[in-house]
Amino acid sequence: MPRAAEYSGYTIVFDLDGTLIDTAPDLAAALNHVMLGIGRPQLAPATVRGLVGHGARALIERGMAASGGQPSEPELQTLLQRFLAYYGANIANHSKPFPGVIETLADLRARQALLAVCTNKPAGLSRQLFTALGMGNQFDAVVGGDSLAVRKPDPTHVIEAIRAAGGDPARAVMVGDSAADIDAARAARVPAVAVSFGYSVTAAQALGADLVIDRFDTLIEALPKLLRLDRAG
């Protein structure tokens, strides 16, 4: 059984896409909807997985580059709006939390940890997705790619997510699946956990995290050591 208040005053920050939720199927559908509309070949979901992590605009740019070249800036803006409209209307058709996520969040809540999300996905779409999946009340803060003037890998994004949850960066851990997550955490002097089941094209073991986990439910047992890491060096 969880020990009450074990993590009181500590903040656990999570990336969203590829860390908490497997969103690749719905992101791929939205991207391919845009591609089809301009006569570009569609991309396999496995290909799209490797393009996720830096927000919708970057996803479209990468998708276009993989299918024949970049659009002009005006065309890119039009494609971005089409993507966001389609994705917002189909945000949880196939997306689902990774195994162990719901149980682990509940466990952390029971131990009174503060929970924050730091994602390059727009904040409104992030909250919409959480609500659609019955996770709308799980987090103390959701800081999206449009919440600040900067985003991951800028460390300010992580720091502000911690503060928005009511936490202290000196008593926090970041959990993510990409170089943007781990680089932002390390620059913020926050211990970092990389999940091996996410969307990174670089192996999780090569991202420079303090710990790599293969299953979400193993996070709980790793936290006591991570929360006591010496961050002075």
Image (cartoon, helix red, strand yellow):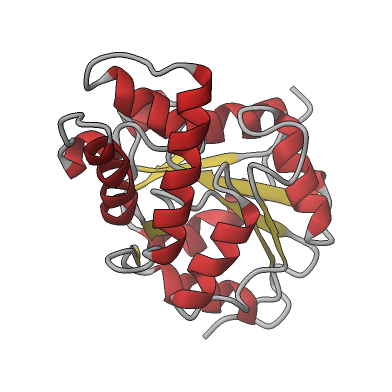
Location of residue 232 by image quarter: top right
In screen coordinates, is 194 left or right of 174?
A: left
- Horizontal and vertical percent position of residue 44: 15, 39
Q: Nearer the viewer, residue 7 or 138?
A: 138
In the depicted structure, whether residue 25 falls above or below residue 113: above
Which residue is pictured at 35% across the width and 55% down the height? 23
Q: Nearer the viewer, residue 202 or 86?
A: 86
Which residue is pictured at 48% across the width and 38% down the height? 80
In the depicted structure, whether residue 198 falls above or below residue 91: above
Residue 54 in sight from this viewpoint: no
- Horizontal and vertical percent position of residue 182: 54, 32
- Horizontal and vertical percent position of residue 75: 45, 26
Location of residue 32 by image quarter: top left
Q: Nearer the viewer, residue 65 or 114?
A: 65
Which residue is pictured at 46% across the width and 54% down the height? 85
- Horizontal and vertical percent position of residue 212: 40, 41
In screen coordinates, is 8 left or right of 197?
A: right
- What is the number of callouts on the image? 0
Where is the C terminus found, in terms of image quarters? top right
Residue 219 in sight from this viewpoint: yes
Which residue is pictured at 81% across the width and 56% down the height? 164
In the depicted structure, whether residue 111 falls above or below residue 72: below
